Every structure is written in C-alpha cells, then in structure tokens.
Amino acid sequence: MFTHQSHPDIIMRLKRAEGHLHSIIGMIEAGRPCLDLAQQLHAVEKAVAEAKKTLIRDHLDHCLDDVAGALSRDQRHVIDEFKAITKYL
C-alpha cells in the first residue's frame, strides 16, 4: 500500500475530529445550548475539510507529478496552475 507523507497528519486530524464529534453527541444528550453545538459542529466540519484538502493537495503534488514526468516550462505551468487552484476547493 502506498502512503503519502501527509497521511499520518491526516489520520491525526480525523481522529481528533472523531473525538470531538463524540463530545458533541454528549453535549446534545446533556441539553447544551444550540449555539454551543453549532460552534462545535462548525469546528468538526473545518477539521474534516482541512483533512480533505491536505489529502487532495498531497495527491496532486505526488501522483500528478509522477504521471506527468519531465515537462517543458509551458506544460509545467499548466500543471502548477491546476495545483494552485485546488486551494479554492
């Protein structure tokens, strides 16, 4: 199995989000205010979204470069631009 350098960090982020999500469930069961719940759910969403972005960027950095191989400067520019646009995912 191929593992990217970012995978341990992604796993750590997701495990933290998983623990946080369990805490939120407990907050709901305890009848905590909706504002508190919404804030905590927002934090979990952001953590998962960041994990996804990291995974996608790492994949592009490694897998796309491996497939593309050596390219001319003009061709390289297109790939670099494609990778740069992923920050808007």
Image (cartoon, rainbow, N blue to C red):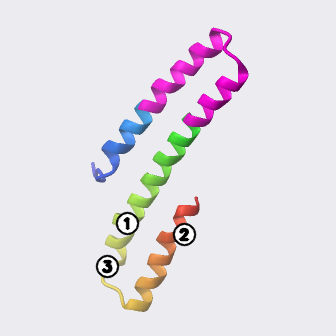
Q: Which residues are magenta?
A: 16-43
Relative to 31, say whether 59 is above or below: below
Relative to 74, say whether 23 is above or below: above
Q: Residue 23 location, x and y as percent? A: 52, 19
- Residue with the mark numbered 1: 61
Quote the CA–CA distance across marks 2 and 3.
20 Å
Is residue 13 rendered to the left or right of residue 3? right
- Residue with the mark numbered 2: 85
Query: Is the residue marked by circle 3 packed among few (<14), some (14-19), or many (20+) residues within 10 Å?
Result: few
The image quarter containing residue 41 is top right
Element type at mark 1? helix
- What amino acid does circle 2 point to? Ile
- What amino acid does circle 3 point to? Gly
Q: Residue 40 location, x and y as percent? A: 59, 29
Q: Residue 88 location, x and y as percent? A: 58, 62
**Given this view, does label 3 or label 1 mark the residue nearer the observer?**
1
Q: Residue 26 location, x and y as percent? A: 57, 13
Element type at mark 2? helix
- The question of residue 39 being in magenta is answered with yes
Marks 2 and 1, the one that precedes in the sequence = 1
Q: Which mark is residue 69?
A: 3
**Given this view, does label 2 or label 1 mark the residue nearer the observer?**
2
